[in-house]
Image (cartoon, grey):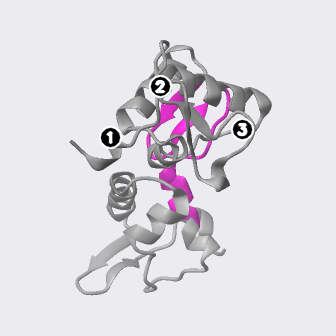
Amino acid sequence: MRESAKSHPPIGLAIPVSQDSVREGIGSVPQVSPRGTYLLIAEMLRKDIELGVTSRTLPSEASLMRTYDVSRNTIRRALKTLEAEAVISPVAGVGWQVSGTSAPPLIDRMTDVLAADSLLVGDTFPSESALCDRFDVSRTAVRRALALMEGAGLLSTVRGKGRVVRALPDRLQQP
C-alpha cells in the first residue's frame, strides 16, 4: 500500500489543495462522495466555465490532477462527463475546449513561432520541450506538428543541432 493512501482524512473531510489553486468553488474535493469524485470535479469545472473563470481552453489533465489532488482517471471521467453534456470538446493539439470557442490548430500556432521569434532560414527552431511548455500540450502533439512542418518543407532535422528552419511559409515571406 502506498504511503499517501494511509494518511487520508476521515470520510467527509476535505483534502486541502495548494494555496495557489484555492479560490471560490475550487480548492478541495471531498475524499469520498456518494456521487463520485469525478462528478463533483465535473460540477466545479462547469461552474468555472459558467462564471467565465475558464473561458476557452481547460488546463491540462496533469494540471487538473494537481489542482484537485486526484488521479488521471478521475479527471478523465470528469472531462468525459462534460463532453457528453456538450459543455467541452477535445481538440487535437489543443486540449479540451469550451464548446462554442475555438483556438487555432497547433500546426498554425507553431508555424507562427517563425514570425514571433523572428526566425530566418538556417536558424534553430525551439526544442520539443520548449514548445510543450510554450503551448501547454503533450510532446506527442508537438511531434505530430513538427512532422507536418518537416513534410511541408519548413523544417529539417540536423543531427546534433535539432530542427532548423529550411524555408518560410508563403504568408511570412516578404514581397
Q: Which residue is mark 2?
A: 11
Q: Residue at x 56, y 68 (%)?
A: 113
Pick the front one: 74 or 97: 74
Q: Residues within 10 Å of mark 1 (few under 14, many from 20)?
A: few
Between the residue at mark 1 and the residue at mark 3, the CA separation in whole angstroms equals 34 Å
Q: Is residue 58 visible?
A: yes
Which amino acid, by three-letter code, is at mark 2?
A: Ile
Q: Earlier in the sequence, mark 1 or mark 2?
A: 1
Disc 2 residue crowd, few under 14, some 14–19, many 20+, Cα 10 Å: few
1 vs 3, front mark:
1
Q: Secondary structure at mark 3?
A: loop
Looking at the picture, which amino acid does disc 1 mark?
Ala
Magenta residue span: 88-112
Residue 175: image tag: none
156 or 126: nearer the viewer: 126
Q: Which residue is mark 1?
A: 5
Q: Residue at x 49, y 48 (%)?
A: 66
Q: Earlier in the sequence, mark 1 or mark 3?
A: 1
Q: Are marks 1 and 2 in contact (CB under 8 Å)?
A: no
Q: Which residue is mark 3?
A: 55
At horizontal 73% and vertical 43% (from top left) the residue drawn is 23
Q: Quadrant of the N terminus?
A: top left
Residue 49, compared with residue 165, is above or below; it is above
Q: Nearer the viewer, residue 25 or 118?
A: 25
